[in-house]
Amino acid sequence: MVLMFWWLALILLALAAAAVFWFRRPKSTESSLAVAHSGRMTSLPSFRRAMRRRLVTTVALLGVIVLTGLSALAGVARPAWVETVNPERKMRDVMLCLDVSGSMLGYDADLLESYQELVDRFDGERIGLTVFNATAVSAFPLTDDYDMVQNYLAEAEEGFRTWGAEGTDYSWSTSPPNIGGSSLIGDGLVSCVDNFDRQDEDRSRSIIFATDNMLAGEPLFELNEAADIAVDAKVRVYSLSPPSVLTTTQTKELRSVSDRTGGVQFDMGSASTIDRIVEEIQSQEAANTPGRSYTIVHDMPVVPLALAVFGLAGVFILAWRTKS
Amino acid sequence: MTVLLNRIKARMTIHAHRRTRRLLDGDYSSVFHGHSLDFDDLRDYIPGDEIRDIDWKATARHTEPLVKRYVAHRRHILGLVVDTSRNFDAVTSAGADKRHLAILMAGMVGYLAVRHADDVMLIHGHAGHTTASPRKGSEAHLEHLLQQILAETGSDSPGSINTQLQWITSHINHRMLLVVISDQAPLGPDAEATIRRLRAQHEILWITITDADLAGLPSASAPFDVARPDHGLPTSVMTKPEVRQEFALAEAARRQQRIDLLAKLGIAHIEIDHPKSALGRLHTLLLRHRRGPR
């Protein structure tokens, strides 16, 4: 809360003080009448009562005038709430890219739980979720409506935990019968890259790519080709793979994709994974998107000006009462 | 240099026709009821009269005690007792100057006395001090006395007629005709005791110069109390109906208390607020005194 034109208020205050000083009524002794024994009057209880009442009214009038003047001055000084907005964070897009193939079904519920934790840590970034198996489905597009994101993630988690009995079931919708094969990893990644919008803006884009990289079928894009597309689109891919001694080759492949796009490969399961991902993404993005912070001024003239208006009404009422 | 007295004489001769003036002379000559051998007439007994003056035979034929009055033959002394404090630098209830009205009243009575070849003295002052003049019978002396009252203009001392009355009780031991010129300052028990004491020795006439009606002052007059010249009095508050009403009641009570007190002590009393009624009021005063206060 700051006063934008405090100097104007000060000038007006000085002017008001000067006006009061110059235009105050001189203590006139002209045509004054000398009387004796005023104690006859001043000792009367009703006179004392009336004087006390007049004193109270005068003090009240003075107080209301001063308050009104101060409110008006405060209004003139333009009270405002100044907010400095750091646009850097708003320029980040994070796509959660989830493999829902049969080999991953056992991990998906936990992964979605991790995603929910992940979303809790974000502030200002836009989040999207794309699930893929044989084909990719955009669960929700990039958005900063975190309540909705949490809802969708919770429902998806519920769907995976109950094998589609409750919540949202993505397994069926991502494996249409007209497309052969499943776990088309490369296609999934390309779909995720494709799901970034606002291509004309220079935004920081990253994908959290959760998959075990167990390919089954003929994809349109090999993982390497998909990685090329991601590099072209300047999308960093942070891959997240379930720990498995059998899949070291696949994990290596994923790491190479992440390395090429400037991301990092994580093993899921360790408690610190989420922290590391958030840290990694945020430090990386902060370096990558130079923020141009700007200031927003919210004017808040309502309270002082309303006070001034009511005060003015009060002044008139009191003045009228004193007069009558 | 008889400026003040000339003005008073002019007022007595021009504004009053001859009959009134002769009437006043007659009033005055009958005022002094000193003890002489010549019996004058009878009047009702008033507490304070000497028992030996009661005419028992006349009283027996009457329902109430009567006292004898005698025509005085010796040279009388008129004592003008005037409060000359700052309270007299104010206005009367009719808007006239209190000090000039006091000078006028003192001058009129004094002039009557001088014309009757009586001596005049002035006892004046304020709450803290009393000044007394020598007693002489000349017009120049009377003018000097009036000038003394005028010279006290601008005094900053509070007034109390009781101080002057006290002074008389302790300093004057011959019989006098006292004309007290005071204002509406309340007469307390002390003053009552002093007056009672004086009444036993002297003839007393009392002139009250009425003070301004504080509840009826217009706001343009910007009134102030002579005791506090730097502070104005709030006319807007003083003219409020409830204040005005209470003030009127209190004033009426005070006035009645004064009238009752002076009547009880057997002192002729008038109130005056303007010079134009001075002659008439003086006549009333002398008449009341001759008839005895009732």
Image (cartoon, coloured by chain):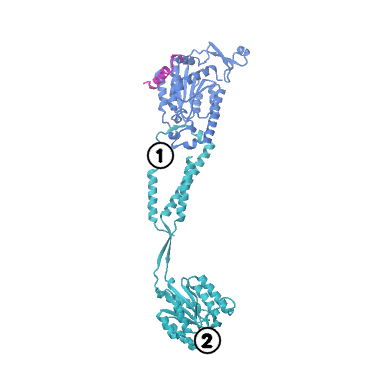
Chain colours: A cyan, B blue
Residue A71 on image: x %, y %: 44, 52
Query: What type of secondary structure mainly makes up the magenta span?
Result: helix
As measured in the structure, the alpha-carbon distance from the residue carrying label 2 to the one carrying label 1 is 99 Å
Do we see residue A8 in this rendering?
A: yes
Chain under numbered label 2 = A
Query: In what quadrant of the picture does the C terminus of chain B appear?
Result: top right
Between residue B79 and residue A84, name the one nearer to us: A84
Task: Tell me the amino acid under the disc marked 2.
Answer: Ser
Q: Which residues are magenta?
A: B1-19
Q: Residue furthest left?
A: B1
Q: Residue furthest top?
A: B38
Q: Earlier in the sequence, mark 2 or mark 1?
A: 1
Residue B230 on image: x %, y %: 43, 37
In magenta segment, residue A303: no
Between residue A262 and residue A112, name the one nearer to us: A112
Secondary structure state at the residue bearing disc 1: loop
In magenta segment, residue B16: yes
Residue A244 is marked as 2
Chain under numbered label 1 = A
Residue A27 is marked as 1
Task: Tell me the amino acid under the disc marked 1.
Answer: Lys
- Left/right placement of residue A102 relative to residue B134 reads right
Residue B156, above or below A168: above
On whether disc 2 and disc 1 are found on a single subunit, the reply is yes
| Residue A230 picture quarter | bottom left
Residue A217 on image: x %, y %: 50, 87
Do we see residue A37 in this rendering?
A: no
Residue A185 on image: x %, y %: 48, 84
Between residue B242 and residue B8, name the one nearer to us: B242
Secondary structure state at the residue bearing disc 2: loop
Query: In what quadrant of the picture does the N terminus of chain B appear?
Result: top left
